[in-house]
Amino acid sequence: MDLLSRLIVGVLAVLITAWLLPGVHVDSVLTAILVAIVIAFLNAIVKPVLVILTIPVTILTLGLFLLVINALLIQLSAKIVDGFSVSGFWTALAFSIILSLVSSILHGLNRSPRE
């Protein structure tokens, strides 16, 4: 059940962020579901490899290079999923930041009182 609630929160976060940010287009709810799944997969599999490979650059930039990695993963997910488009790197960077904020807010609202 936890996986389903995380997926729903991810889909809602993608839809809200796409609605808030000009330059990002999501065709349908099905597309948002696919985007949430692809982003989750990329964050679980590809991002750790990229983080390890870019440790020196990340240290030199005091961690700001992680934002670049997030933006590149958003652009990669836009290439993978038809019906999801991001207009450029800066839009992808803003999308990744806003998506993180919206996801955090939605996860906070989704928590039960006993947690």
Image: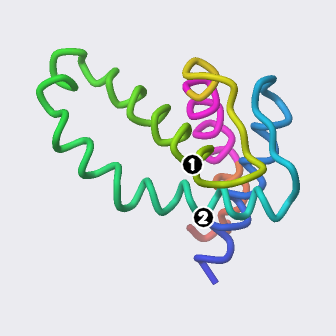
The quarter of the picture where the C terminus appears is bottom right
Please rate how many residues cluster around mark 1, counting C-alpha atoms within 10 Å: few if below 14, some from 14 to 19, many from 20.
many
Quarter residue 7 falls in: bottom right
The quarter of the picture where the N terminus appears is bottom right
Q: Position of residue 107 (x, y in %)?
A: 64, 55
Residue beneath disc 2: 37
Most common secondary structure along the magenta stretch: helix
Which residue is painted at 68% across and 71% down in the image?
A: 5
Residue beneath disc 1: 77
Of 86 and 9, which appears nearest the observer? 86
Q: Position of residue 6 (x, y in %)?
A: 63, 66
Callout 1 amino acid: Ser
Is 40 magenta? The answer is no
Q: Earlier in the sequence, mark 2 or mark 1?
A: 2
Per the image, label 2 sits on a secondary structure element best described as: helix
Of 56 and 86, which appears nearest the observer? 86
Which residue is painted at 64% across and 58% down in the image?
A: 36
Instruction: State the CA–CA distance, disc 2 to disc 1.
Output: 10 Å
Per the image, label 1 sits on a secondary structure element best described as: helix
Residues at discs 2 and 1 in contact (Cβ within 8 Å): no
Callout 2 amino acid: Ile
Q: In the picture provided, is 51 more to the left or to the right than 31?
A: left
Which residue is painted at 72% across and 47% down in the image?
A: 14
Is 101 magenta? The answer is yes
Of 98 and 41, which appears nearest the observer? 41
Q: In the picture provided, is 27 more to the left or to the right than 46?
A: right
Q: Position of residue 101 (x, y in %)?
A: 62, 36
Quarter residue 58 falls in: top left
Q: Which residues are magenta?
A: 93-105
Q: Is residue 4 positioned above or below 27 on the image?
A: below
